[in-house]
Image (cartoon, grey):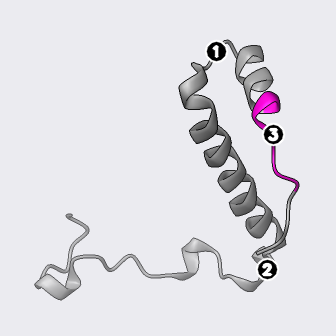
Amino acid sequence: MPTTQDLLPHEVARWAQRAGLPLEPGRLDLVTATANHIQGVIAVLRELDPGEAAPASAYPARRGVEEGRDDAAV
């Protein structure tokens, strides 16, 4: 996983305050950990080359065929 600079609790509190979402002190560590995890996931997604995947239209819409239905009903 690529490294990103972790947010510090005071930064998260400031961002939350700017967004109009003041945090209770007991929640700050959990929100900080969550924000850092999300940053890590986004960093991984940014490294992906979307050219490696076929567009969704390339895949047949065949959900339900296994159950014996051959229409588009779900």
Labels 3 and 1 touching (C-beta < 8 A): no
Task: Kindly identify the residue that appears in the image at 81 percent across and 65 percent down.
Answer: 46
Q: Position of residue 2 (x, y in %)?
A: 83, 72
Residue situated in front as seen by the camera: 66 or 72: 66
What amino acid type should be assigned to the residue bearing mark 3? Leu
Residue that carries the numbered disc 1 in the rendered image: 22
Residue situated in front as seen by the camera: 41 or 61: 41
Highlighted magenta segment, given as a residue range = 5-11
Compute the Cα span from label 3 to label 2.
35 Å
Crowd class of label 2 (few under 14; some 14 to 19; many from 20; radius 10 Å) = few
Label 2 secondary element: helix
Residue that carries the numbered disc 2 in the rendered image: 51
Q: How many marks?
A: 3
Q: Position of residue 1 (x, y in %)?
A: 76, 75
Lower position in the chain sequence, tag 3 or tag 2: 3
Picture disc at residue 8: 3
Label 1 secondary element: loop
Lower position in the chain sequence, tag 1 or tag 2: 1
Is residue 15 in the magenta section?
no
Task: Kindly identify the residue that appears in the image at 71 percent across and 50 percent down.
Answer: 36
Q: Nearer the viewer, mark 3 or mark 1?
A: 3
Q: Nearer the viewer, mark 1 or mark 2?
A: 1
Label 3 secondary element: loop
With 5 as the anchor, is 62 left or right in this view?
left
What amino acid type should be assigned to the residue bearing mark 2? Gly
Residue situated in front as seen by the camera: 33 or 67: 33
Q: Nearer the viewer, mark 3 or mark 2?
A: 3
Compute the Cα span from label 3 to label 1.
16 Å
